Image (tube, rainbow, N blue to C red):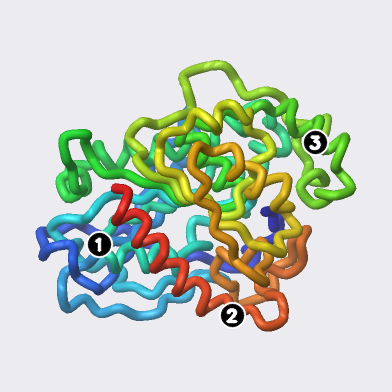
Amino acid sequence: MTHRHFIATAAIAVAAFGFATCQPAAAAEVGWRSMSMPSAGGGAPVPVALWYPAEAGAVVRSVPMGPFGVRAAPGAPAAASVRGLIVVSHGTAGTELGHARLAESLAARGYLVAALRHPGDNWQDETLRTQRAERYFDERPRQVSRVIDALLADAAWSARIARDARGPRVGAVGHSAGGYTVMALAGGLPDAQRVTTHCREHGDEDPIFCGLQRGTSGTAPPPAAGAPLKDARVRAVAALSPMSVVFDPESLRRITTPLAIWVADLDRFLVPRFHAEWAAKQLPANTLRHVPNAWHYAFMDAPTMSIPSPDGDLAANPPGFDRTRFLEQLGGELSDYFDANL
């Protein structure tokens, strides 16, 4: 997804708060705070929004943050332990606040949820895709791995995250390009030549995806060589209408990490038969879950203002689709999924 002008007029007020010793992770109250972590190469710090189970008695309220917002207790003391860490990856030109409803559901179930603002691929800065496309498929998953590094190195949070003999319990959720990102963490390997071939042969059938600018040539060069993109710490992945055509199909067939895909049946941005449905057919276990009468942005919170995108207004829904109710249902499904697989 892309929405270039998406929060340009809205100020996002965030603050960092201290840590405290707290009650068990079963608390239904949800706390929220922000943090930042150093970026690779010494660039600007990377904003990360955190949702977590709070100490009993925390006062939850709605806090507007530009066109989105959180329903949590800002700065509330965190519970003494959490079920695990779930990292959230937004789509192209997105924001760390765009999946707050899902994050809140997971935090209410007892998880620490960390949503990053992808450097170079967010509402303020799209240079990773438009100017450094040769790094796009490589950098996005590595950015998520760096968030995991940062939280596991933070004594206050690391001590709270549930562990077993395999180490800390970590999962990942991603939407659109974020879906690609978390599937790469599970072991999917990008083959950017597939994008070129796909758009040459099926560009008129997948026009929004194929119309995105990818570097000066309009194509996505192969990712940079280096360490594998797979992150063995990530034990379960949930991909929401993922950008999938880029994957080498054989790499998907080799995935052993639990991986579930949700697909919006009326998705026009990433046409399902080329992306989510195609990817599900390659996986060793087909865990595709259909969302009837849903467009691509069904997985995002509905903004409080009209935000244009190549696929229309982010706030719009097909006639008869209740996004609020769907996100409540999806939050429960994701919580159940991670409970079962972490």
- In-image side of 123 versus 154 (left or right): right
Residue 23 in the image: above or below residue 215 = below
Residue name at image x 53 percent, y 62 percent: 98
Quadrant housing residue 21: bottom left
Quadrant housing residue 312: bottom right
Residue 27 visible in the snapshot: yes
Disc with the residue nearer the chain's start (2 vs 1): 1
Type of amino acid at the residue the image marks with label 3: His
Image coords of residue 169 (percent x, y): 26, 44
Q: Secondary structure at mark 2?
A: loop
Residue 47 visible in the snapshot: no
- In-image side of 97 versus 297 (left or right): left
Image coords of residue 131 (percent x, y): 72, 33
Residue name at image x 52 percent, y 35 percent: 184
- Spatial separation of the CA atoms under disc 2 and disc 1: 26 Å
CB atoms of marks 2 and 1 within 8 Å: no
Residue name at image x 28 percent, y 65 percent: 109
- Spatial separation of the CA atoms under disc 3 and disc 1: 41 Å
Q: Could you say which is closer to the camera, residue 298 or residue 49?
A: 298
Q: Which residue is mark 3?
A: 198
Q: Residues within 10 Å of mark 2 (few under 14, many from 20)?
A: few
Residue 230 in the image: above or below residue 290 = above
Disc with the residue nearer the chain's start (3 vs 1): 1
Q: Which residue is mark 1?
A: 110
Look at discs 3 and 1 and give the one toward the viewer. 3
Type of amino acid at the residue the image marks with label 1: Gly
Quadrant housing residue 54: bottom left
Type of amino acid at the residue the image marks with label 2: Asp
**Residue 322's disc number:** 2
Q: Secondary structure at mark 1?
A: loop
Image coords of residue 24 (percent x, y): 12, 63
Q: Secondary structure at mark 3?
A: helix
